[in-house]
Image: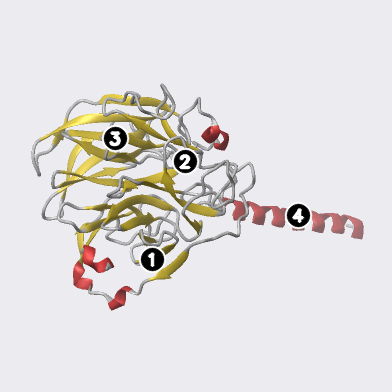
Amino acid sequence: MNNHTRSKILIFVITLIVLIGLIIIAMNLPSNSESPNNNNNPNNGVSNSNSNNNNEIVDENNNDQEMIRVVTTNLESPWSIVFYADIPLVSLRDNQEIIEILEDGSQRLVGKVEQAVPRGEGGLLGLAVYDNFLYTYYTTARDNRVTRFVLSGTNGSLSISDEEVILEGLPNASNHNGGRIHFGPDGMLYVTTGDAANPQSSQDLSVLSGKILRLTPEGDVPDDNPIRGSLIYSFGHRNPQGITWDEEGVMYSSELGQNTWDELNVIEANNNYGWPLIEGIEETNEFVSPIQQWATSEASPSGLTYHDGKLFIANLRGNSLSVINLTDLTSSEIYFKGEYGRIRDVTIAPDGSLWILTNNTDGRGSPSSTDDQIIAINIDYFK
């Protein structure tokens, strides 16, 4: 073998090693909105230096740990937690199951949503309760949809009726499915939809992806919606997963960003929040900017709730709970950083305590032997 042949073989081997290394790196890069470093933004991620948040990490060691208790453990891929009277109900994304949590912390199956199909970030997602109805948001093989069931029975014996479809045909994908549903103070059902991996759809008022929707409890278009004949309440969203209201009726939404900024927005009718043309705070008259933003590596906000002048945000990638006082919407206090892993949902229980729902068993976390968990925290812990 001459020197020329040896050189060609050496170059080939080196090239092959480099290609294999690049493939391994690519396989390990995050590729979805809940570990958000993907490239679905046609602007390739808007660069923005106007970060306005001031995050303070709170040292929980200075607080009374007796104010925290574990409600239940070993949940499988939980997504949403709501209360029917004083009965906690949880959706399990990948199992198609709705379960109730009994007083001793044990779990009981209430029913299965047979049409739900787990795929990526899809599956059985949001829950909401209105009167004696349980509403669900879930992914099927062909769409995202909202349905409802009649609840009957008491704690330990709850059951659900046959399913009634309220809204179907919402675009779906393996990521960016939105999925949070919540009844507002006006008695209307609000639904967050993601862009279903099609960013341009968020600006298209002929489709319902990348929006916050407003509908009657029966699934009809309210007469006073901002766009006549349309369910669209606001648009220009990427993947909103949290909605709540304060005592004054102001609506807030937490939203997963692309490569740059996660967002907290004040939601008003017919506003355009800019995705995919802007991400995070921008000085523009055309779009509405968030009131607070975080680097995507620090947050990935999902569930959101309000109590007594404070917003509470469940952070996935941030492995934390953000607390924002309405007296200063530009800053956050960060609790439980790294203590419980990914946090998917947060809500106020009937007894006034704050419940957080961890989310380490969905394939992206590092579950402990007791994950996933519901943790109850005395609300005075945050004063």
State whether residue 360 appears in this view: no
Q: CB under 8 Å between callouts 1 and 2?
A: no
Q: CA distance from mark 1 to mark 4?
A: 46 Å
Pointer 2 residue: 176
In front: label 1 or label 2: 1
The kind of residue on which mark 3 rests is Thr
Specify the farthest residue to the bottom.
Answer: 62
Q: CB under 8 Å between callouts 4 and 2?
A: no
Pointer 3 residue: 136
Query: What secondary structure is marked by label 3?
Result: strand
State whether residue 109 appears in this view: yes
Mark 4 or mark 3, earlier in chain: 4
Q: CA distance from mark 1 to mark 3?
A: 30 Å
Pointer 4 residue: 15
The kind of residue on which mark 2 rests is His
The kind of residue on which mark 1 rests is Ile
Q: Residue 314 occupies which quadrant of the picture?
A: bottom left
Nearest the camera: 296 or 363? 296
Query: What secondary structure is marked by label 1?
Result: strand
Pointer 1 residue: 334
Nearest the camera: 28 or 177? 177
Is residue 260 left or right of 370 when viewed as pictured? Answer: right
Q: CA distance from mark 1 to mark 2?
A: 25 Å
Mark 1 or mark 2, earlier in chain: 2
Query: What secondary structure is marked by label 4?
Result: helix
Mark 1 neighbour class, 10 Å CA radius: few under 14, some 14 to 19, many 20 or more? many
Residue 58's label in the rendered image is none
